Image (cartoon, helix red, strand yellow):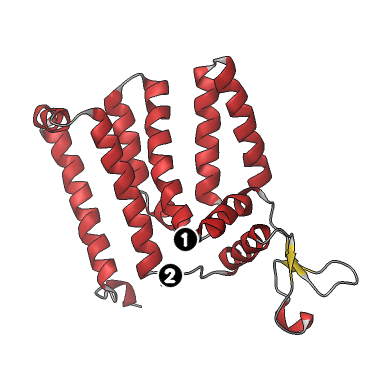
Amino acid sequence: MTDWLGLPRWPADAVAAVAALLAVTGALGVLAWRPRAARLVAALPTGAWVALLALTAAALSHGYVAHFLRGGPRIIDATSYWLEARSFAAGAFTFAPPGPLASFGGRFLVAPPDADRLGVIFPPGYPALLALGFLAGAPLAVGPLVAAALVLTTFALGRATARRDDVALLAAALSTLSVALRYHTADTMSHGWSALLASLTLLGALRATPRAVLGAGLVAGWLVATRP
């Protein structure tokens, strides 16, 4: 009953606990010393802060891949997306299992009638993106790149809604520090990509130029094709 009081079992847990403490301390410090915090932010151009946050998000997601996932997808959803993307990269919607069909069928896999091949039931939006990673020879780089793009889009969305760079930077920082986004831009699942598509849709709709609205419609279509 007191297991939750134990010390972290993995070094990364201790690092995360210290990082959370520093984040809370930093937030309190910003509230207490706003003029100094403002001068600190002003020490670098806004674009440099955004780039730094984007690179940090990508690095943290990559660290999640290396430390927690040990270099590959782990849960059944992620492995199914992985199989679907590999099939797309090979120019097919199904794949041939390396043995009897009944030995390899799973929860998210289906077999076409009278066929000895398997397919994945998930919508094609995210596997199509992940397939590009397979074609480039680096599928696990897709998630960290999505993480960086999500920080950039979050900043742009914050600026478009609040008309203030400090609010937009805070939104970008929250995106960087989100543990949920670090996981969902590490393992090969569609949640992080869906968040990016949703943010881009909103951003295009807010800008309201013909090109931006057209882009928002196309991105919204990809979102529907990812998680309808």
Residue found 53% across the figure and 25% down from its top: 204
Q: Are marks 1 and 2 in contact (CB under 8 Å)?
A: yes
Q: Earlier in the sequence, mark 1 or mark 2?
A: 2
Residue 193 locus on image (x, y percent): 53, 47
The kind of residue tagged 1 is Leu
Q: Does residue 66 appear left or right of residue 34 in this picture?
A: right
Residue 185 seen? no
Disc 2: which residue? 71
Residue 112 locus on image (x, y percent): 84, 66
Residue in the foreground of this view, choosing between 115 and 198: 115
Quarter holding residue 28: top left
Disc 1: which residue? 140
Residue 43 seen? yes
Residue 80 locus on image (x, y percent): 63, 65
Residue found 34% across the figure and 37% down from its top: 172
Q: How far, Cα to Cα, is label 1 from label 2?
A: 8 Å
Q: Check the image and report above or below for 109 versus 143.
A: below
Check disc 1 and report its element: helix, strand or loop. helix
